[in-house]
Image (cartoon, grey):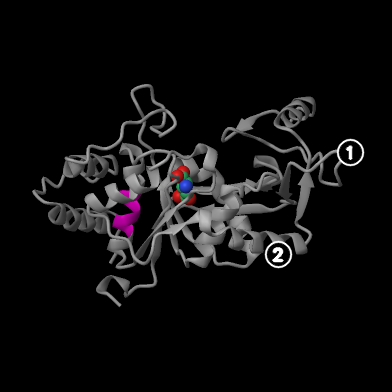
Amino acid sequence: MDARSRSGYVGRFAPSPTGPLHAGSLVAALASQLDARAHRGRWLLRIEDLDPPREVAGAADAIIGTLAAFGFEHDGPIEFQSRRHAHYRQAFERLQAAGLVYPCACTRREIADSVVRQGLGRERHREMVYPGTCRHGIADGRAARAWRLRVGDAVIDWTDRSGRSFHERLADAVGDFVLLRSDGLWAYQLAVVVDDALQGVTDVVRGDDLIGSTSRQILLHRLLGSPTPRYLHLPVVTDARGEKLSKQTGAAALDMDRPLAALEAALAHLGLGNTAAQSLAGFWSEATGRWARARAIG
Ligand code: GLU
């Protein structure tokens, strides 16, 4: 066991290989790595290659290579979600056996139409609240397009390590949500929870863009009987138009020849200034100390 494995802390970085690492994803990677180092914990790397149509050939290798070149250190083998479908299936079957899953035949258009008809209205986190159309069975002659989780009247109260508290009734926020699509695609929400649980993740540190998913994930942890990790969500990096930098909107890949400049920019985004370090080792040591002091760790 190495010196960093002394505490029970387990963090992770879980990028989807839809493009190379960019200034925004670097912030999430840096924050989770600094939090793990400050806690003398373990830090896992998990490639979330669940959605082949959205993936870009070579992106996983590019992300892994950039992290290594920038001085990130992960513990244990890199996991790939594409090789873990059996785990998602097992969790799904447990939920199914508990009567918590049902098939749904609705198309996106049908959901949109009935949301408007019922005046349930609003879009949230770019998702519609599912109105429960198929909850009591699908109409004759229709085929299942997806399997959904019954959220019932679950209310999730949770507090982010940033200090923000949430009180979310899932039926109002998202409705019964998809776990599996009929084309065999596992939903991010299920896969991330199953993996965080099986890998013993205690701390999820990631961008604010995922904060709206957290109550769904907490519900799944509860239903599957796994301990809920702590969560820390951080402000995302935006472009000149105020939009979140993302691979989909064509954020530039990081300059592999200037790792320190990119790391310093990411650290500044986290409000921790500039270390003026001359080497990667110097950067990591100073940045970890700053993170630990800012968050009163250790
Ligand atoms: N794979 C997700 C993404 O790249 C992140 C998952 C997570 O951190 O929970 O957006």
- Residue type of the residue flagged with mark 2: Arg
Q: Residue 288, labelled with which disc?
A: none
From the viewer's perspective, tell me whether residue 9 is left or right of residue 38: right
> Relative to 154, does residue 227 appear above or below in the rendering?
below
Of helix, strand and loop, which one carries label 1? loop
Residue 257, by quadrant, is: top left
Picture residue at 72% right of the left edge, 38% below the top: 130
Residue furthest toward the top?
241
Residue furthest toward the left?
278
Mark 1 residue CB less than 8 A from any atom of ligand 1: no
Residue 111 locus on image (x, y percent): 74, 32
From the viewer's perspective, tell me whether residue 81 is left or right of residue 180: left
Mark 2 residue CB less than 8 A from any atom of ligand 1: no
Picture residue at 56% right of the left edge, 60% below the top: 194
Residue 276 locus on image (x, y percent): 11, 45
Picture residue at 26% right of the left edge, 42% below the top: 266
Q: Which residues are magenta?
A: 29-35
Quickly name the residue at label 1. 141
Quickly name the residue at label 2. 94
Q: Few, some or many C-alpha atoms within 10 Å of disc 2 (few <14, some 14-19, many ≥20)? A: some
> Relative to 97, does residue 144 appear above or below in the rendering?
above
Residue 236 vs residue 248, the one in the foreground: 248
